[in-house]
Amino acid sequence: MADDKEFDPLRLLQEDLKDDDQETIVSATNKLETIAIALGPARVKSDLLPFLTEYSETDNDEAQTNIARQMGNLVPHVGGAANAHILLPLLEKYAGEEEFVVREAAVDSLNKIATQLPKADIGTKYIPLIRRLANGDWFTSRVSACGLFHVAYPHAPDTLQGELRGLFANLCNDDTPMVKKAAFQNLGKFAIALQKQYFKTDILPVLKSLSVDEMDSMRIHVVVCCVQLANKMDPADFAATLLPLIEAVQDDTSWRVRSDLCKQMPELCKNVDPQIAQKKLVPIYAKLLRDKEAEVRTMGCRVLAEVCAIVKTGLTEIVSCLEAVATDGVAPVRVAFSKSLIPLCNILGKEVAGKTLIPIITQMCTDENSEVRGNIVDSVDQICEADQPGGGAIITAIINALMELSKDPKWRVRQSVVDKSTLLAKCVGVKNFDKKLQGIVIAALSDHVFSIREHACV
């Protein structure tokens, strides 16, 4: 009979990790939790964890990432929450590694374990770990520490919460840009975890300092933090503390910061009081649509339909910008706008659509950029949803435009028109289809591009 040791899960893991084939090594580390189940809590503590600690000295980032990621799932396999702290030393080592993905996996696992630790262990074992990382000589450990505060703080003893606030403030003022950036990335999450009374004393000063930081890569985090905090604050508190910071961002000297404000605008509008969104954020957003930098206008156009769908009313300032955006001299701006234009028919209603959007749609169907023309065609299904069956003003306008686009020099545009013919037939009915659209399909059957003929047959 074969020796039972040949089937020992730990021994098989050790052999696989010594293999020269990277795929074998990675596959073995992916089975760590299964191995822990097979070994049982006693051997996980006595054999597996010491081996993994020894193996952590090897230089294999992918394997170390897998191990760090699965460590967070091992609490039940070391005897439960009472023994969860024995997983912390190895994860603390991984949290200081040079490779970012290893540290990120370690932080995720540490946060997962923190929610399962007894409160006594939070104070005696977990917070000392955060303290060591936050005061580490090498920046990597301090970067990792930034991601641990928001989970640990609510579970920390009252006597240690003040220390955690102080440690986090130190990281926000760290001399190393990468540490400051990590702190600012986690500032919103940490602020949400704090008691309300500490916002003005511990968070707001950091935000104000951040908003005037000399590096735009730092200032950009002001917007994200405000978004995260918006739905956690009373409208009056938000208007008094965070809104002035957002209003300052619209005039930031860096286009990247202004562009990020555009990007975050849908989430911001969703999280604040509707009156604040309508009266304060809409004017800011409309100004960004007219920004001097094309990158900002492009980002503004990408989120246009989403912002309007969230705010819904009081959009006059945004509507007044649409014609200028439709004729923007920079093609990427018009391309982004053409993707958002058609959904506006539903959002703004038929009166605005008929007066403002139809002329813009008609104009963009003849835009010199083929991608703009193609985006209009691709959105026909949304036009049908926005209008009544049988062909209203919007459908009539788009059909006339599509008749011209069916002769477009770009074959992909012509093919898109053919693809949408079935949908349009449902919208306009048999009579209008025979009168206007049938000719497009018939002509496509003899198009010189094979793909168009094939699509017409379908």
Image (spheres, rainbow, N blue to C red):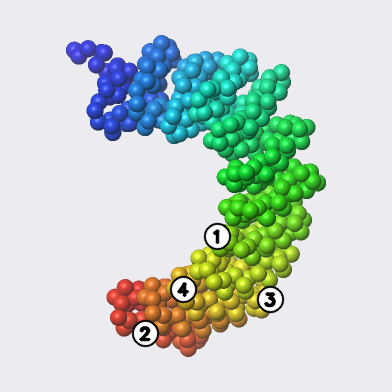
Residue in view at x 72 percent, y 68 percent: 316
Which element carries disc 3, helix, strand or loop? helix
Residue 123: image location, x then y, percent: 63, 17
**For the residue carrying disc 1, how many other residues have a C-alpha within 10 Å: few (<14), some (14-19), or many (20+)?**
some
- The disc, 2 or 4, on the residue closer to the chain's N-terminal end is 4
Residue wearing tag 4: 369
Name the mark nearer the viewer: 4 or 1: 1
What's the amino acid at mark 3?
Glu
What's the amino acid at mark 4? Asn
Distance of label 1 from label 2 (alpha carbons): 40 Å
Left or right of residue 220: residue 38: left
Q: Quadrant of the C terminus?
A: bottom left
Position of the N terminus, as image quadrant, is top left
In front: 392, or 182? 182
> Compared to 307, does 164 lie above or below?
above
Which tag is nearer the camera, tag 4 or tag 3?
4
Q: Are marks 1 and 3 in contact (CB under 8 Å)?
A: no
In the picture, measured across the screen, residue 63 lies left or right of residue 217, that is left
Q: Label 2: which residue? A: 443
Secondary structure under badge 1?
Answer: helix
Residue beneath label 3, please?
351
Mark 1 sits on what residue? 295
Residue at 27% over, 23% down: 18
Secondary structure under tag 4 reads loop
Q: From the viewer's perspective, is 452 left or right of 122?
A: left
